[in-house]
Image: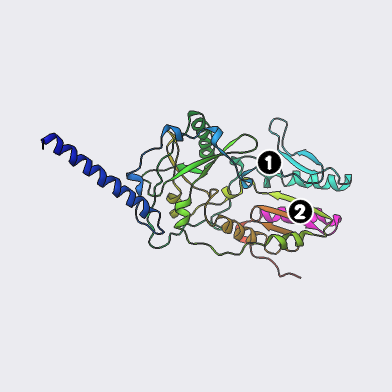
Amino acid sequence: MTDKATKEEGVAAVNDLVERLLEHWAEESLRPNSPINLIEFLHELDEADVLTLDDLETAPAEMEDDYPEVQDPLLEINVGSEAEPRPLFVSHLLDLVLAAEIICLLHEYKDRFAWDYHEMPGLPRSLVEHELKIKEGFKPFQQPPRRFSTEVQLKVKEEIERLLKAGFIRTARYVEWLANIVPVLKRTGALRVCTDYRNLNLATPKDEYPMPMSDLLVDGAAKHELLSFMDGHAGYNQFFVAEEDVHKTAFRCPGAIGTYEWVVMPFGLKNAGATYQRAMNLIFHDLIGRTVEVYIDDVVVKSPSKADHVGHLRQAFGRMRMRPSLIGQYPARK
């Protein structure tokens, strides 16, 4: 046997060994609590797997910022200026006196509403933070990179710049945990950046904080003459991630956009709903069940009599303005 033939057999044997080893690692990496991370051995996907705008999924309902459809026709109210409109909506079926009172109230409390990222200072850390505990036996995981078309990359860059300007994210270096982005399209055509936190969520223990039951919420709002619906604008982003856990939210963007980490709570993290509900229950504690019902970022102000509704709205808006140190210091229910 020639030296060339011997060398070729040796190369084939090594290739076969590497292939079988990678297959074994791939199987092991799928097991719960697996310490194996294939990032060092995986390469970017083929050109056939390049993600284009046509491939993007529709954004989940929780990420929509437009107003939900209701039975009543809506009257648009601008609490801003002609140059910078700030639209809010009230029912077109309200009698003129009540409508005028509610519109005046909306102007008075317009600082409690947000229309863009930069108008959301976030809830104080002294009130609530989102923690990312890691279960024993789990090691940091880095997802292999994905390919995106140039068109998607440009839109992702625009959204990243918006998030940076708002202070929602910051650049990340020397990352341990690393997730891919999942761009989604809203009904308006705007692109939003979600993050694939499947591996981080698998390593995070479940927060068993009790969530409201939808049927009881519906029953609680029934038989009231007037209801006002409010929705948190990019609600999850109003909560800060605990500083010691920020590095775990690191994510990779395509091309030269870089790696970043979330300073505020992003959509898609395990226990995000529990953190949100806990804070809302704390803020509206003595009003819930009486004049307010809350499910995560959806708030309903309810009144058995139309004459009481402006007062109930004022009470809810006033609670939103309350200093964190005073939240929870309520008189006993009568």
- The answer, for residue 287, to whether it is visible in the render is no
Q: CA distance from mark 2 to mark 1?
A: 21 Å
Between 20 and 321, the one lying in front of the other is 20
- In this rendering, the label closer to the viewer, 2 or 1: 1
Give the mark nearest the N terminus, 2 or 1: 1
Residue 304 percent across, percent down from the top left = 83, 59
Instruction: Tell me the chief SS of the magenta region.
Output: helix
Q: Is residue 178 magenta?
A: no
Q: State the extent of the magenta-drawn residues as a range.
A: 301-321
Residue 14 placement, left or right of 241: left
Does the segment drawn in magenta span residue 302? yes
Determine which residue is flagged by label 2: 313
10 Å crowding of disc 1: few (<14), some (14-19), many (20+): few
**On the image, numbered disc 1 is attached to which residue?**
66
Which corner quadrant of the image does residue 260 belong to? top left
User: What amino acid type is highlighted by mark number 1?
Assistant: Asp
